[in-house]
């Protein structure tokens, strides 16, 4: 009975999104089927985030675990059922004023996430300052963008050993220590504030240079303010160095210090330049990182399973790092150690799979061109570089090392042969 429960538990985790249609491949994908360690679909090779799957609850659990045991625990709640932390994602729905006219639809707009600030006006203004295609409005491309960035920037296998493939006890221990370290030293959640309000708070506290001020330049104020000797504070974005517009919200990062601020659209990862999803950032050496690229800066990542490598033994090939057991053919999963392979879209493929699935077909003999065979390529066509294949389509003269005249996939050694074929 216990074995059946355990088997069911493992299966349920693997069945998330099972059979869901791929939004990229459409009908070419038979439906989502999770590869047992690559974290992609076995059918189309796309990620779960590229399939039509509602992952909101899983995302909230993931972020809840990430923020657990940090100073941001106010953003999570504990489930009564299993005591697991759950991200209290701030969902905002706005409704247009009720019209006095009849038969007028009441328009509503729902933000799948908004910064958890006291003022809803400030939260909405922050979202409006983001690029239109990245605003997390329910049912729009902005919501899809947020979903993909949530999966890309904060992979659950970067924080939860149980989501990784066959870690040893020693690797689990190293990973737990690594996660604790980045929670203590790098992880943060951006804070949305009006710079002028921050300045007023500092003044009210009587602070002159306590490190709680925003980046600013003091210049003469416009109008009557200049005649009375008043000064106007101009706030500069840490990323683009341009001035903030008066009254607009800015993003602050506590770990960076409140002497720095960002435009909402400038609060991005220094590596991928994508908006930091839900303002979750990692701070290192005066730079903002998303979770993925912060971890990449600290640990090698396996090109096969996408997990961080905590083992002392791993291999490097084609500019990437690999678990020894995961340097496998991307098509059939056979181990490639000591074998001939070909890189296809930055993924290693064994020779048999390459010939079967990816190799160019000889225009002459219609056989696949072996990856180690000499070939001639012109335009969209490929030929074996042999006397039997690379020859005049009219007189069969070998064209290797000779001038030739191509015409719609045919080869000719001379104008005469070309005219003969036309007639």
Image (cartoon, grey):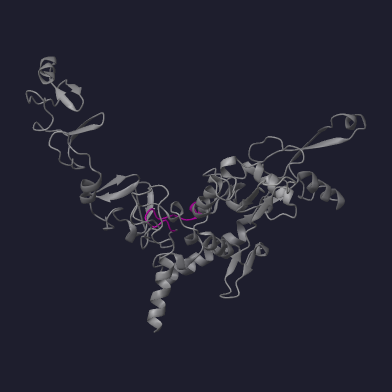
Quarter of the image with the N terminus is bottom left
Q: Residue furthest front?
A: 102
Residue 11 covered by magenta stretch: no
**Can the viewer see residue 42?**
yes
Rendered location of residue 98, percent (x, y)? 73, 49
Whether 300 is drawn above or below 358: the answer is below
Quarter of the image with the C terminus is top left
The total of numbered circles placed on residues is 0
| The image quarter in which residue 59 lies | bottom right
Q: Does residue 353 appear to the left or right of 286 in the view shown?
A: left
Residue 306 covered by magenta stretch: yes
Q: Main secondary structure of the magenta part?
A: loop
Whether 86 is drawn above or below 29: the answer is below
| The image quarter in which residue 220 lies | top right
Residue pictured at 41% horizontal, 65% vertical: 15
Q: Does residue 225 appear to the left or right of 412 in the view shown?
A: right
Q: Nearer the viewer, residue 237 or 175?
A: 237
The magenta region covers 295-307
**Can the viewer see residue 282?**
no
């Amino acid at each position: 009975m216990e074995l059946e429960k355990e088997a069911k538990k493992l299966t349920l985790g693997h069945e998330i999104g099972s059979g869901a249609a791929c939004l990229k491949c459409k009908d070419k994908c038979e439906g989502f089927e999770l590869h047992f360690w690559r974290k992609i679909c076995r059918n189309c090779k796309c990620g779960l985030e590229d399939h039509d799957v509602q992952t909101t609850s899983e995302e909230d659990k993931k972020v809840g675990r990430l923020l657990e045991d940090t100073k941001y625990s106010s953003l999570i709640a504990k489930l009564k059922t299993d005591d697991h932390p759950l991200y209290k994602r701030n969902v905002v729905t706005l409704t247009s004023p009720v019209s006095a006219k009849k038969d007028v639809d009441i328009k509503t707009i729902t933000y799948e996430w908004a910064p958890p600030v006291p003022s809803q006006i400030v939260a909405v203004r922050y979202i409006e300052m983001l690029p239109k295609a990245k605003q997390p409005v329910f049912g729009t491309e902005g919501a899809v963008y947020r979903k993909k960035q949530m999966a890309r920037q904060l992979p659950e296998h970067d924080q939860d050993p149980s989501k990784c493939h066959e870690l040893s006890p020693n690797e689990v221990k190293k990973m737990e220590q690594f996660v604790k370290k980045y929670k203590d030293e790098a992880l943060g959640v951006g804070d949305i504030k009006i710079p002028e309000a921050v300045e007023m708070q500092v003044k009210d506290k009587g602070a002159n240079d306590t490190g709680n001020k925003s980046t600013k330049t003091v210049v003469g104020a416009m109008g009557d303010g200049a005649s009375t000797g008043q000064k106007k504070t101009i706030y500069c974005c840490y990323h683009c160095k341009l001035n903030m517009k008066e009254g607009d919200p800015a993003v602050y990062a506590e770990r960076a210090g409140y002497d720095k601020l960002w435009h909402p659209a400038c609060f991005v990862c220094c590596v991928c330049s994508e908006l930091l999803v839900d303002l979750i950032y990692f701070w290192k050496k005066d730079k903002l990182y998303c979770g993925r690229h912060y971890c990449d800066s600290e640990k090698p990542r396996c090109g096969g399973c996408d997990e961080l490598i905590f083992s002392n033994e791993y291999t490097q090939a084609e500019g990437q790092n690999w678990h020894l057991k995961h340097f496998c053919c991307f098509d059939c999963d056979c181990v490639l150690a000591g074998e001939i392979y070909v890189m296809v879209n930055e993924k290693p493929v064994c020779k048999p799979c390459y010939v079967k699935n990816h190799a160019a077909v000889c225009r002459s003999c219609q056989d696949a061109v072996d990856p180690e065979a000499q070939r001639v390529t012109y335009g969209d066509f490929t030929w074996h570089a042999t006397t039997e294949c690379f020859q005049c389509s009219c007189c069969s003269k070998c064209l290797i090392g000779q001038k030739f005249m191509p015409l719609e996939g045919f080869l000719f050694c001379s104008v005469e042969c070309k005219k003969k074929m036309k007639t």
